[in-house]
């Protein structure tokens, strides 16, 4: 069954007899926080009773808080991923230096430089 297409958002409801008699309705879809905030803002601008306006403003405040939380979490995740990449490359650089120091110590074979090289390894 192919997905998408012209009638992808439509669903049948209340079958009555032939296929032609089906009533087609849109599937309810979740709208984004941004679109919800915009639609509630438009409703508030209309001439509404005070109780309805207060309820809409409360709902608008809640949606704005959710959006702020969502934005903050996205920024935190971005920073976390950037720091993880940095730590990965720093760790690779340190491991490379340790490996090179060990190779130099084994290649030199001299015991005079062991204390100096051991000090360098302890710094890493």
Image (tube, rainbow, N blue to C red):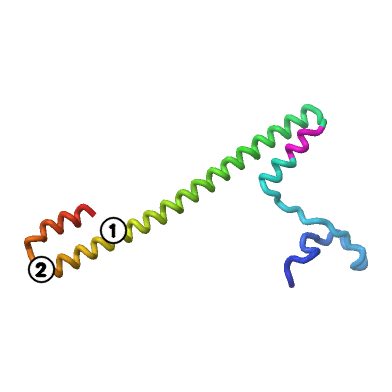
Residue interval drawn in magenta = 40-46
Q: Is residue 74 left or right of residue 11?
A: left
- Pinpoint residue 7: horizontal percent, then vertical percent: 80, 63
Estimate the spatial distance between the alpha carbons at disc 1 and disc 2, rounded to whole Å. 23 Å
Tell me the residue that label 2 is attached to: 109
- The spot of residue 12 in percent (x, y) is 83, 61
Q: Quadrant of residue 19?
A: bottom right
Query: In this orientation, which residue lies closer to the viewer: 103 or 18?
Result: 103
Task: Reply above or below: 97 against 59.
Answer: below
Question: As displayed, is residue 118 above or below residue 106?
Answer: above
Q: Position of residue 34 (x, y in %)?
A: 67, 44
Measured along the vertical axis of the image, is residue 60 above or below residue 84? above
Which badge, 1 or 2, is on the more N-terminal residue? 1
The question of residue 43 being in magenta is answered with yes
Q: Quadrant of residue 51?
A: top right
Q: Residue at x 71, y 32 (%)?
A: 57
Q: Residue furthest top?
A: 50
- 19 left or right of 28? right
Mark 2 surroundings: few (<14), some (14-19) or many (≥20) residues within 10 A: few
Q: Name the magenta segment's main secondary structure.
A: helix
Residue 94 got which mark?
1
**Which part of the image, by quadrant, shows the N terminus?**
bottom right
Residue 33 falls left or right of residue 53: left
Question: Mark 1 touching mark 2, by CB under 8 A?
Answer: no
Callout 2 secondary element: loop
Residue drawn where x is 61% and y is 42% of the image: 67
């Amino acid at each position: 069954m192919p997905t998408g297409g012209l009638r992808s958002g439509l669903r049948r409801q209340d079958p009555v007899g032939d296929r032609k008699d089906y009533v087609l309705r849109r599937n309810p879809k979740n709208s984004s926080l941004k679109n919800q905030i915009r639609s509630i803002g438009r409703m508030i601008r209309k001439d509404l009773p005070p109780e309805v306006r207060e309820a809409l403003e409360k709902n608008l405040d809640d949606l704005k808080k959710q959006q702020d939380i969502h934005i903050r979490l996205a920024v935190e995740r971005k920073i976390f991923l950037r720091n993880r990449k940095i730590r990965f490359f720093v760790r690779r650089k340190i491991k490379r230096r340790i490996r090179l120091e060990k190779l130099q110590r084994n290649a030199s074979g001299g015991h005079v430089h062991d204390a100096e090289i051991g000090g360098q390894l302890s710094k890493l």
